[in-house]
Amino acid sequence: MPAGFYFGIEVFLNGLMAGVMYSLVALGFVLIFKASGIFNYAQGVMALFAALTLVGLQNGQVPFAHLINAIFGTEVHHFGWHLPVFFAILLTLGVMVLFAFLVEKLILKHLVNQEPIILFMACIGLAYFMEGFGDLMWGSEIKKLDVGIPQGGNFWIEEVTSGLGGDGFYGFYLDTLDIYATVIAALLVISLVLFSQYTKTGRALRAVADDHQAALSVGISLRAIWVIVWTIAGFVALVAGIMWGSKSGVQFSLSLIALKALPVLMLGGFTSIPGAIVGGLIIGVGEKMFEFLIGVPFLGGATENWFAYMLALMFLVFRPQGLFGEKIIERV
Amino acid sequence: MLYREAGVFKTSYAKDQETFPIPFDKAGYFLALIVAFGVIPFLVNDYWANAILLPFLIYAIAAIGLNILTGYCGQVSLGSGGFMAVGAYATYKLMTAFPDLNMIIVILLAGLVTAFVGVLFGLPSLRIKGFYLAVATLAAQFFLVWLFNKIPWFYNYSASGQISAPERVVLGFEVTGANAQPAVIYLFCLCFTVALAWVARNLTRSNTGRKWMAIRDMDIAAEIIGVNPLMAKLSAFAVSSFYIGVAGALLFSVYLGAAEVGEAFGIQKSFLVLFMVIIGGLGSIFGSFAGAAFMVLFPVLLKNVMVGQLGWATDIAAHFEFIIVGALIIIFLIVEPHGLAALWRIAKEKLRLWPFPH
Amino acid sequence: MNAVETFTTPDGRTIGGPVMEMRNITLRFGGVVAIKDISFDIREGEIRAIIGPNGAGKSSMLNVINGFYHPQEGEVFDHGKKRAPMRPYQIAHQGIARTFQNIALFKGMSTLDNIMTGRLTHMKSGILSHILWKGKAENEEVVNREKVERIIDFLEIQTIRKTPVGRLPYGLQKRVELGRALAAEPKLLLLDEPMAGMNVEEKEDMSRFILDVNDEFGTTIALIEHDMGVVMDIADRVVVMDYGKKIGDGTPDEVRSNQDVIDAYLGVAHD
């Protein structure tokens, strides 16, 4: 086998890993959409915000330091402590719970029964708000996030596979972080499935997803459910934020990468958790392979910017409900 | 009693359907036009033209365009930035390929090119709806920006990858290039804005507009009463893209003078125009103007207060801009989905009674 | 078929040949059979009722007539000619208008604009003339506005002319929807439960409008209605459906004495 073939496989594997990351964000979208019919555009910014908060807490940053300094002429920046990762993550979770509560209280409650497209635009507003708020709270410079997950190429895999492709090939280069991410994502999905199948809250969640009115009539509190769902979505955002943040630093572009979860959902269907996973993998592999096979050789590269969207667009024209969505029967 | 619509009786349907059915409104709009054409050109200086007036006029065109698609036809687009880029690059290619072509024709042609591209990306709208379509328009946004960035033909193989507008003259006055006078380019843009706003008003009150609104309010019922959904949606995409293309053409050639696609026409532009439409008022031409005015004036104001008066760093002002704009979007969607235009209508109702409480 | 076959109703109206004829229509959604081998016709100038229990396939039948659903088997004949498969908007241009079981008005538009949309199959000016407004577009607008105003007078909804329909009470919305369908001056008017959810007074009003439309404009009407009293009063002929099948067809009196119909309505168990 020529080395090129193994490079192709390496690209494929890296695509799979990138796809896992997309799936992680997409998962948050699906959860909220199933429970409330809201297409939460802000999910990506939530991941960014969670990562920012985690870094800030870990490093003992003073929230709103820049603003405080600007108003009072002080020079405060740090509390001078470093929190252990575990506590920082717990505290960040607390912040996300508070956030979920506020979103329900201040926004969702007032937008019940609005058209989906209005809710969608409200989420765009929310994304904007959080972007500014996160930056104001923690500062907008690029931050390094380290929660102790090892990074860099995995030597073991590289050595084991180095013999495959002859002289030009030095073994598969896979980032250890990506491997961890894959395992964590798998665990996350399994626990979410267990949660929704075997707990009372999970059953209530599925009831709400099926029919709001019917769920209300058997005494399920819609508002409590929304808080729970947004909390879980906040948790998923935190996990995604940790993974993305550890990989490429905590910065604004994180929320743009997270936008790619949208085409993932269009492929996988908005209501299907397996769809989000498979869609993420297809997009991840698809864009890496397209760039490798066509983008770099023929189109000048950087096709990853649009490939996912174009693929989703093409796909939707032929199958509007996505891979796993149910067929929509229109009636009047 | 400041604003009255009582005592206005129409004796024919034609009168009832004219542009401004209420004489008070008519007088107000004519006054605004007189000020815009007769007074401002003599007062305008570089700062006012560049910081406020030109962006306002140009973005008003883009906002009307997006409002036709989103507010009137109900199809949300996040691709405005990409379509503005099409208008800008079409202008650049036309200006450099045909140096003698009149600038007005160049800009209108650029609009037509954008309309064509808009129709192409509007084709999927027949199959996909709502936020599915919104995400699909992101494909247009990212693809177009990539295209203009990667294909050197579009920027005439310039080393910087930028496009810059050569000097062009309309009726003996320079409208592009470094020597163009603020009053001249202000009037140049104003003519486009006024003409296009008038056309938009005509379209939206006619059968075309009713078809768009029917699709927006209930697409299945619209089809059953005889609206061809493909034609209605594509015509909305075409007209909307034409407006956005003209706005992109003016933004590049007259206002910026030089542009780099990712910076000038990135996804932030798409959101900017969408926010103008939401804050101004979905389905209102007046709202498009109000929204454009707000989104242009607000950052200037915020910067003046926070940086100029309080002496804060510019990045804090920028963060506050995000926070306030985001919050306003949510507040408007909750309290008044029809935006500033609806607030204006309510104010008029209050003024009708003023100064008497009942 | 015999197109000149006509007869006169007891109240003196002339009923012509079939304008619309269903032949052996079968409609399935996946494995569910919504309509099973149904044939009937609608004659010019008559009021034809379709009745039956919930889920009998009545609305699906109207959806087949106006092209929203395409039956897997069977044909629709329009004035004796087989109708090619068409999109709903093309069928609207053939002169078929309808109202909906759950009101399908354009909520963001005024009463006037809603009824004006009903005129669009009659408006020919294109987008280019709309851009300039003056001239062709404006004239057409005025001419059609006059027709719409006549309908507004007829339905007695002058006072809500410029009110957004989303703000109107249910009964008035039903009336505006009828107005929109009438504005199309249809050859065939399909009414899907025009009196659902109305009180007695509103039902009487609506019955009067339906009879007047039929009488004054000679419009052929096919309607679905649950209120048997109303149906027996205003319909010339009645089709009875149950579980997607036709179980009766004839004048109100004939249908009333049909044993299958009585069974269906009294709830005899199906085996």
Image (cartoon, rainbow, N blue to C red):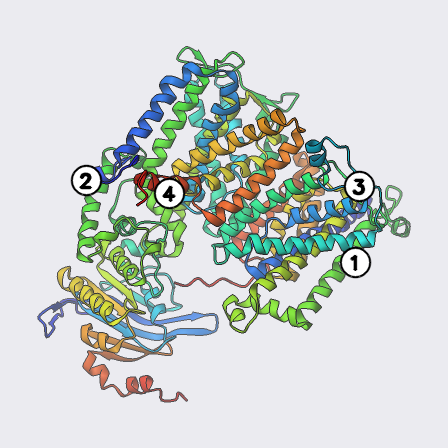
Label 4 in the same subunit as label 3: no
Q: Amino acid at mark 2?
A: Phe
Instruction: State which chain disc 1 sits on.
Output: A
* Numbered label attached to residue A144: 3
B10 lies left or right of B296: left
Q: Quadrant of the N terminus of chain B?
A: top left
Residue A41 rendering spot, x and y as whole percentages: 59, 49
User: Which quarter shows the C terminus of chain B?
Assistant: top left
Q: Are tags 2 and 3 found on a single chain?
A: no
Q: Is residue B42 above or below residue C6?
A: above
Dot 3, crowdedness within 10 Å: few (<14), some or many (≥20)?
A: some
Report the chain holding disc 4: B
User: What chain letter is assigned to the residue under label 2?
Assistant: B
Residue B114 appears in the figure:
no
Residue drawn at (34%, 22%) of the image? B34
Query: At label 4, which amino acid type do we have?
Result: Ile
Which residue is disc 1 drawn over?
A183
Few, some or many C-alpha atoms within 10 Å of disc 1 (few <14, some 14-19, many ≥20)? few
Q: Which residue is mark 2?
A: B9
2 or 3: mark nearer the eye: 2
Instruction: Using the numbered discs, state the Cα–Cα distance from disc 2 to disc 4 in whole angstroms.
Output: 22 Å
Marks 2/3: CA–CA distance: 70 Å
The residues tagged by marks 4 and 3 sit, at their Cα atoms, a distance apart of 51 Å
The CA distance from mark 3 to mark 1 is 22 Å
Q: The disc labelled 3 sits on which kind of residue? A: Lys
Please identify, in this view, whether the residue under mark 2 or under mark 4 is nearer the observer. 4
Q: Secondary structure at mark 4?
A: helix
